[in-house]
Amino acid sequence: MYAVVETGGKQYRVAPGDSVEVETLAGDVGAEIEFGRVLAIVDGDSVRAGVEAGNARVRGTITAHGRGEKTLVFKFKRKKQYKRTIGHRQNFTRITVSDIVG
């Protein structure tokens, strides 16, 4: 059994016991969290999507907050001696999914 949830403008496929890194969510480490925006639930051969999965919930626990690996961004304009290098590290929240209700 797995579900597709949407959070932070992205979609994630989750199953009970999975650990996923999502965009930063408010809450302390160890806090319970619930995803209300469930797009689909697949259980064996049965698939519930859209309105049928609208009342489903995915519950989990916040395991950690952190920052991802650095991404380098390099800009330049040829023949103009213009070069800029900057880095970016995206914040994330790691969640362990406990169960899918619905």
Image (cartoon, helix red, strand yellow):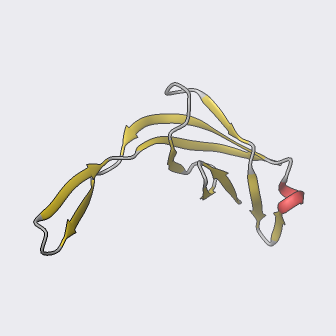
Which image quadrant is residue 58 in? top right
Left or right of 19? Residue 99 is right
Give the side of residue 35 with respect to residue 97, left or right. Answer: right
Left or right of 69 on screen, residue 29 = right
Question: Percent x, y for residue 69?
Answer: 30, 51
Which one is nearer the viewer's eye here, 44 or 58? 58
Q: How many marks?
A: 0
The residue lying at 15 percent from left, 63 percent from top is 82
- Residue at the far right: name it: 52
Q: Does residue 40 sit above or below 26 in this rendering?
A: below
x and y, in percent, of residue 68 in the image: 35, 48
Q: Toward the viewer: 72 or 58?
A: 72
Q: Residue at x 43, y 35 (%)?
A: 65
> Where does the image place residue 55, in percent across and percent down from the top left?
86, 47
Q: Is residue 36 above or below residue 45?
A: above
Q: Which part of the image, by quadrant, shows the N terminus? A: bottom right
Percent of width and height locating residue 73: 27, 59
Left or right? Give the position of 57 relative to 95: right
44 or 56: nearer the eye? 56
Q: Residue at x 55, y 51 (%)?
A: 18
- Residue at 81% from the left image edge and 48% from the top image edge: 56
